[in-house]
Amino acid sequence: MTSLAKGGIATAALGTAATGAYAGSIYLKESVSKRLSDEGYTLISSIKNPEHEALQWKEEFKSDKTAIKTLLKLTDDNDDLGGKSLKSWCSSKLSESYSEKLEHLESVKKYCTLKTIGDWLTRNNKKLLTNDSENGSKWDATYNKRKTAKTSRALVGLADEWPQDSTDKKEADLPIIKRWCESTSRTHFKAYEQTFTHVKEWCTEGGTA
């Protein structure tokens, strides 16, 4: 084999290797969507029901309207249009190749994913009660408000109805309520469910929806 032929084969081999490496580098790049999903985030776009998804985008927009309008450069205050614009923006950002230096990455995490009910309470300036001893009287006040309103006890796993006489079930009820509040506040806020309202009523300072 001549030196020229050998050189041609070598060049071709290098070209093939380079092409393969380039294709491999493209293949290995993951999308923002996949990376966030792998990190444990749940995307709003994962909601299967179109009406439920649209409501979630609308509530997400409403929850931080001023900041989102600035981010998306919107001037219209309409919540439905804002939700649709946010959905479109998130769809575009989530399809991009992931990079730690990606512009607006933190905003994507903040506005394109489901939050816990606890996080949603914070965003809505509501204080979730904890088991700290200093919150004892606040739990009592919230409990008494639910008792006066005759709010359904079954919502938080309590048996029986509210007593018709002066019998007080508070000591037995509160540990059950606190466990329910702690576990439920860690679940995702879904705008099409009433769970968030129930948590506000039973688990926050003031106990109001």
Image: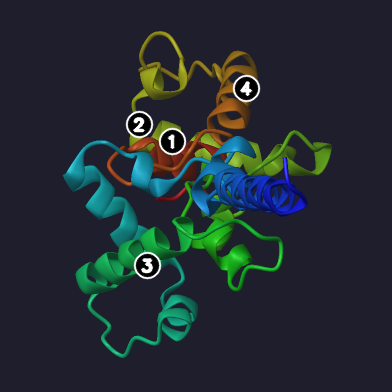
> How many angstroms separate mark 3 from mark 1 (CA)?
31 Å
Q: Is residue 50 visible?
A: yes
> How many angstroms separate mark 4 from mark 3 (CA)?
31 Å
Q: Residue furthest bottom?
A: 75
> How many angstroms separate mark 2 from mark 3 (CA)?
30 Å
Of pointers 3 and 1, the one earlier in the residue sequence: 3
Q: Residue furthest top?
A: 160
> How many angstroms separate mark 4 from mark 1 (CA)?
17 Å
What residue is shown at x 35% (from left), y 47% (from top)? 45
- Residue 179 is marked as 4
Give the x, y percent position of residue 181.
Answer: 57, 31
> Decide: marks 2, 1 in contact (CB < 8 A)?
yes
Q: Which residue is mark 2?
A: 151
Name the kind of residue labelled 4 in the image: Arg
| Horizontal relation, residue 108 to residue 86: left or right | right
Q: Residue furthest right?
A: 133
Q: Which residue is mark 3?
A: 61
Task: Judge whether 207 appears above or below 61 on screen.
Answer: above
Task: Judge whether 23 appears above or below 133 on screen.
Answer: below
Task: Judge whether 156 appears above or below 68 on screen.
Answer: above
Give the x, y percent position of residue 69.
Answer: 40, 82
| Horizontal relation, residue 3 to residue 63: left or right | right
What residue is shown at x 73% (from left), y 52% (from top)? 7
> Closer to the camera, 103 or 174?
103
Of pointers 2 and 3, the one earlier in the residue sequence: 3
Rendering quarter of residue 85 = bottom left
Q: Which residue is mark 1?
A: 146
Name the kind of residue labelled 1 in the image: Arg
> Closer to the camera, 32 or 64?
32
Give the x, y percent position of residue 3.
Answer: 77, 51
Tag 1 secondary structure:
helix
Between circles 4 and 1, the one closer to the viewer is 4
